Image (cartoon, rainbow, N blue to C red):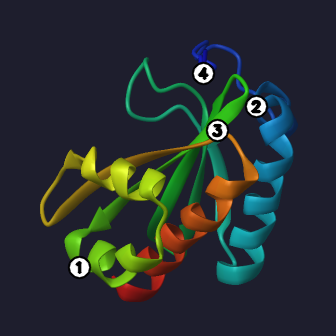
């Protein structure tokens, strides 16, 4: 479950990534629209971080990286770096699921990289809180 698109030789379209994510593709499409309208985010389909991560869409604002979103079978995964300062600012309004994701972060500097798997509409709000805080608090 949650396998990724790992064939580096075949670059997917955005529609292919959404389709691979199954029912969650609609949620990703909504997140994509939100990122573009809220932050004028630019997108790029890429195969970053090595062979085990698969295809993603990189979202950036100017030269600043916001996040990568990876297609997964039946889900998608928002991958972003969050500082401890940013997490502290929003932790009270996050679900236990989201707090657990931050607790399991990959440590890096003052904070770390989180892998936020979205499998339902309930997860979108907190994913947006992480993104919003990252962009505004930096």
| Sequence-first disc among 3 and 1 | 3
The reply to whether the C-beta atoms of the residues labelled 4 and 2 are less than 8 Å apart is: no
Q: Earlier in the sequence, mark 3 or mark 2?
A: 2
Q: Residue at x 14, y 66 (%)?
A: 110
Mark 1 nearby-residue class (10 Å; few <14, some 14–19, many ≥20): some
**Is there CB contact under 8 Å for labels 3 and 1?**
no
Label ID, residue 2? 4
Q: Residue at x 49, y 62 (%)?
A: 95
- Above or below, 128 relative to 90: above
Whole-angstrom CA distance, mark 3 to mark 1, is 26 Å
Q: Position of residue 72 (x, y in %)?
A: 64, 28
What whole-number distance in Å separates the C-alpha atoms at marks 4 and 2? 9 Å
Mark 4 neighbour density, 10 Å: few (under 14) some (14–19) many (20 or more): some
Q: Secondary structure at mark 3?
A: strand
- Secondary structure at badge 4 equals loop
Q: Which mark is residue 76?
A: 3
Q: State the residue position of label 1.
A: 85
3D distance between C-alphas at marks 4 and 3: 8 Å
Q: Residue 81 placed where, x, y %? A: 34, 59
Q: Judge left or right: residue 25 versus residue 5.
A: right
């Amino acid at each position: 479950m949650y396998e990724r698109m790992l064939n580096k030789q075949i670059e997917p379209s955005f529609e292919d990534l959404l389709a691979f994510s199954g029912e969650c593709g609609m949620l990703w499409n909504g997140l994509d629209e939100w990122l573009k309208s809220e932050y004028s985010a630019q997108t790029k389909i890429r195969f970053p971080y090595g062979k085990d991560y698969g295809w993603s869409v990189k979202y950036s604002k100017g030269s600043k990286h916001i996040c990568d979103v990876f297609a997964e079978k039946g889900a998608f995964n928002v991958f972003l770096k969050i500082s401890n300062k940013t997490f502290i600012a929003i932790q009270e309004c996050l679900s236990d699921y989201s707090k657990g994701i931050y607790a399991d972060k990959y440590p890096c500097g003052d904070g770390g990289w989180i892998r936020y798997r979205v499998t339902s509409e309930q997860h979108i709000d907190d994913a947006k809180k992480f993104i919003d805080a990252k962009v505004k608090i930096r």
